[in-house]
Image (cartoon, rainbow, N blue to C red):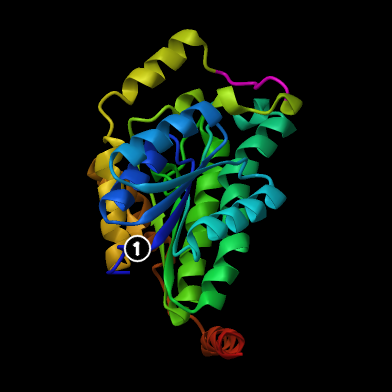
């Protein structure tokens, strides 16, 4: 979407961090912006900040894991600004520990927000984008942890790997509709995601994180040199305008990721597949093509 002035963006997790950085970039491009977040005080503060920048802004308190609430938020955004053109499924939480120690509540919380929140945003807004027939763009926040797994961060990685796969498939499905999809895969951004437990619902009980206070302090400090959210927001704006499939800003992980991919390619080296399997792959493509053409 080259021309963004006057269009509307809806940003979850928009009260701080990456979400606020995106909102600032969209305001700077002349867009109307809806920010949605579970933290009401931070939401009000962010809305005031964006308004001071000259933005036409509307704030909505939202738990992205609540499907009915997401539908209501979409209705409210449309009542305020008309059609929503850019959807940013950004809200996220983190959990640190080993899978063997995680409770079902830990899994439900992280997957409910990081994956379920993206699913709810897509299921709510994408049909509306298609019906409007004006194109548009979907931005889904994953992570470098959605490309490379790490021990002690596996539940978070699970959620982010899913968002990457979801986004890649969605991009193929929406391209014929003139709707772009970008997935964000950053590493360290200066945000407070390490303190996400503050927003964990009471009904899910206390987390079973393995990090003690000293370990958490080290983790917090590791983000001190992270990318500024406003700088990252500018990258996202450019990706939306140029329909980029990915935003992957932290090149210090490039060598390790290349090693991973090359290792997979080495596994595939060998004899060519038999003709029957090649034919089967082609038949599957034709079957899906028929679905797209309906």
Q: Position of residue 25 (x, y in %)?
A: 29, 48
**282 and 39: which is toward the camera:** 39
Q: Is the magenta stretch mostly helix, strand or loop?
A: loop
Q: Quadrant of residue 128?
A: bottom right
For the residue pair 26 and 228, the one nearer the viewer reads as 26
User: Considering the image in quadrants, where does the N terminus appear?
Assistant: bottom left
63 horizontally vs 274: left or right: right
Could you tell whether 174 is left or right of 65 in the image?
left
Residue 156 visible in the shown view: yes
Question: Between residues 182 and 251, which one lies in front from this camera angle?
Answer: 182
Label 1 sits on a secondary structure element that is loop
Q: Mark 1 points at which residue?
A: 6
Q: Using the rendered view, name the quadrant where residue 66 is placed.
A: top right
Counting from the top left corner in percent of width and height, residue 108 is at 69, 38
Q: Residue at x 26, y 58 (%)?
A: 238
Specify start and end residues of the magenta stretch as a single range. 205-210
Residue beneath the point at 41% across and 71% down: 270
Where's residue 61, x and y in %?
A: 58, 39
Pointer 1: residues within 10 angstroms few (<14), some, or many (20+)? some
Q: In this view, does 213 lie above or below 261?
A: above
Tell me: 46 left or right of 103.
left
Q: In which quarter of the image is the C terminus?
A: bottom right
| Residue 250 in sight here | no
Question: Is residue 88 found inside the magenta-colored segment of the image?
Answer: no
Residue 6 location (% of width, % of height): 34, 63
Q: How many labels does the image show?
A: 1
Give 46 or 102, whichever is nearer the viewer.
Answer: 46
**Farthest-out residue, right:** 203
């Amino acid at each position: 979407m080259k021309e963004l002035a006057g269009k509307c963006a809806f940003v979850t997790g928009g009260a701080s961090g990456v979400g606020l950085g995106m909102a600032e970039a969209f305001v700077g491009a002349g867009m109307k912006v809806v920010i949605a977040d579970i933290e009401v005080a931070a939401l009000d503060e962010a809305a005031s900040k964006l308004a001071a920048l000259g933005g036409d802004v509307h704030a909505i308190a939202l738990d992205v894991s609540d499907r009915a609430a997401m539908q209501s938020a979409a209705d409210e955004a449309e009542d305020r600004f008309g059609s929503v053109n850019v959807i940013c499924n950004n809200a996220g939480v983190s959990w640190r520990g080993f899978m063997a120690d995680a409770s079902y509540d830990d899994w439900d919380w992280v997957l409910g927000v990081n994956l379920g929140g993206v699913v709810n945003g897509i299921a709510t807004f994408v049909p509306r984008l298609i019906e409007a027939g004006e194109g548009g763009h979907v931005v889904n926040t994953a992570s470098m942890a959605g490309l490379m797994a790490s021990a002690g961060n596996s539940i978070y990685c699970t959620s982010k790997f899913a968002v990457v796969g979801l986004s890649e498939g969605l991009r193929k499905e929406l391209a014929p509709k003139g709707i772009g999809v970008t997935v964000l895969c950053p590493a360290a951004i200066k945000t407070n995601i390490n303190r996400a437990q503050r927003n964990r619902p009471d009904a899910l009980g206390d987390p079973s994180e393995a990090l003690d206070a000293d370990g958490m302090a080290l983790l917090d400090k590791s983000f001190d040199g992270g990318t500024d959210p406003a700088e990252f927001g500018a990258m996202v704006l450019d990706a939306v305008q140029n329909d980029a499939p990915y935003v992957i800003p932290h090149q210090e992980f490039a060598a390790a990721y290349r090693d991973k991919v090359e290792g997979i390619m080495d596994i595939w080296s060998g004899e060519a597949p038999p003709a029957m399997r090649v034919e089967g792959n082609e038949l599957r493509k034709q079957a899906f093509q028929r679905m797209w053409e309906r």
